[in-house]
């Protein structure tokens, strides 16, 4: 009985977890949004979220590792799919509709 792990042990029976559709933890998304608002500055994003810059860098790195995307691609995808909403980047909607008659 020498050698580890043994043949037929639980190491050989492990099953990979199914990918979850909503895999992004909320805190990591908050850091990504703060990073965008801060103009790409990790230290400024960390201040906005209230964490240390090294923690903010770790959150961004985790998002990149889990998604397989660059930070830029994450931002574009998040905005396109609606899970990354940054008010300063959203288009401005005027209060008047095109069909409204002009006021004098």
Image (tube, grey):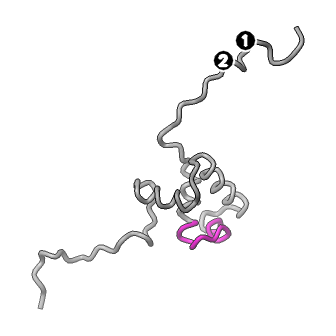
- In reply to whether residue 101 is colored magenta, the answer given is no
Read off the magenta span: 35-47
Picture coordinates of residue 58 (x, y %)? 69, 55
Q: Quadrant of residue 59?
A: bottom right
Mark 1 closeness class: few <14, some 14–19, many ≥20 residues within 10 Å: few
Secondary-structure class at tag 1: loop
Residue found at x 66% / y 60%: 56
| Left or right of 92 on screen, residue 101 | left
Picture coordinates of residue 15 (x, y %)? 61, 23
Q: Give the number of callouts.
A: 2
Residue 65 sits above or below residue 90 on the image? above
Quarter of the image containing the N terminus? top right
Measure how far apart labels 1 and 2 are at the Cα level. 7 Å
Which callout, 1 or 2, points at the residue further toward the start of the chain?
1
| Left or right of 54 on screen, residue 22 | left
Label drawn at residue 44: none
Q: Which residue is mark 1?
A: 8
Picture coordinates of residue 70 (x, y %)? 58, 57
Instruction: Say whether marks 1 and 2 touch (CB < 8 Å).
Output: yes
């Amino acid at each position: 009985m020498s050698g580890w792990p043994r043949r037929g042990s639980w190491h050989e029976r492990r099953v990979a977890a199914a990918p979850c559709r909503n895999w992004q933890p909320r805190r990591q998304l908050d850091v990504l949004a703060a990073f965008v608002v801060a103009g790409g500055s990790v230290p400024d994003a960390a201040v906005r979220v209230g964490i240390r810059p090294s923690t903010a860098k770790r959150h961004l790195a985790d998002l990149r590792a889990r998604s397989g995307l660059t930070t830029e691609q994450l931002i574009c995808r998040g905005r396109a799919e609606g899970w990354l909403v940054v008010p300063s980047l959203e288009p401005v909607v005027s209060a008047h509709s095109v069909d409204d008659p002009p006021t004098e």
